[in-house]
Image (cartoon, helix red, strand yellow):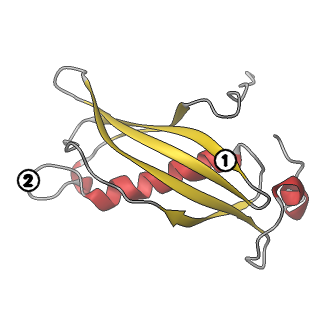
Amino acid sequence: MTTETAPPPGSRHLALRIVTMPRDTNHYGTIFGGVILSYIDQAGFVEARRHAPCRWVTAAIDRVDFKAPVHLGDIVNFYAQTTRIGRTSVTVRIEVEAERNTDGTHIPVTAATLVMVAIDQAGLPIPISQAGNATGNTPTA
């Protein structure tokens, strides 16, 4: 079994990597923006989860401007970086790039900043420092 060391706080790292499928495309052969937004949300959770093994919800997401299309068969990389750690929340920056299936070039697609909030089983915000205890786990970071 291998153990993975979490990147230092504030560093950018790969949080999620997917390959686009026909079910994700519109009639132009490009990926629906909502599909990318869903993966941004998942990448935000992956980053927040590094800070405490608890329930996390997305409280806010900033403006998302799509700079380039994502095509069927592209590999899409979602890079995450924690930019702020609060008492009950973390702010996460997600940068998205498409790796073209035709030539392997990497194209910036979009970026977003999310605020992820740690919650208990009742859906109430909890301090991150206690978040592992709320689930019966010990915090990992």
Task: Determine the CA span between mark 1 and mark 2.
Answer: 38 Å
Marker disc for residue 28: 2
What crowding class fits label 1: few (fewer than 14 Cα within 10 Å), some (14-19), or many (20 or more)? few
* Residue at the limit of the structure toward the left, as seen here: 28
Q: Which of the two discs, 1 and 2, sits closer to the camera?
A: 1
Residue hosting label 1: 84
Q: Residue at x 29, y 53 (%)?
A: 65
Numbered disc 1: secondary structure:
strand
> Residue 108 location in percent, x, y?
30, 35
Q: Is residue 8 left or right of residue 98?
A: right
| Residue name at image x 26 percent, y 50 percent | 66
Circle 2 SS class: loop
Q: Is residue 115 left or right of residue 39?
A: right
Q: Quadrant for residue 50, please give it.
A: top right
Quarter occupied by the N terminus: top right
Where residue 136 sits in the image (x, y, percent)? Answer: 90, 59
Q: Position of residue 23 (x, y in %)?
A: 25, 56
Q: Amino acid at mark 2?
A: Tyr
**Nearer to me, 93 or 136:** 93
Residue 67 versus residue 27: which sits nearer the camera? 67
Q: In the picture shown, does residue 89 fall above or below 8?
A: below
| Foreground residue among 20 and 38 | 38
Task: Specify the amino acid type for callout 1.
Answer: Arg
Q: Work out whether 35 lies above or below 13.
A: below
Q: Residue at x 85, y 47 (%)?
A: 139
Of the residues under marks 1 and 2, which one precedes in the sequence? 2
On the image, the x and y values in percent for residue 69 come to: 19, 44
Residue 126's disc number: none
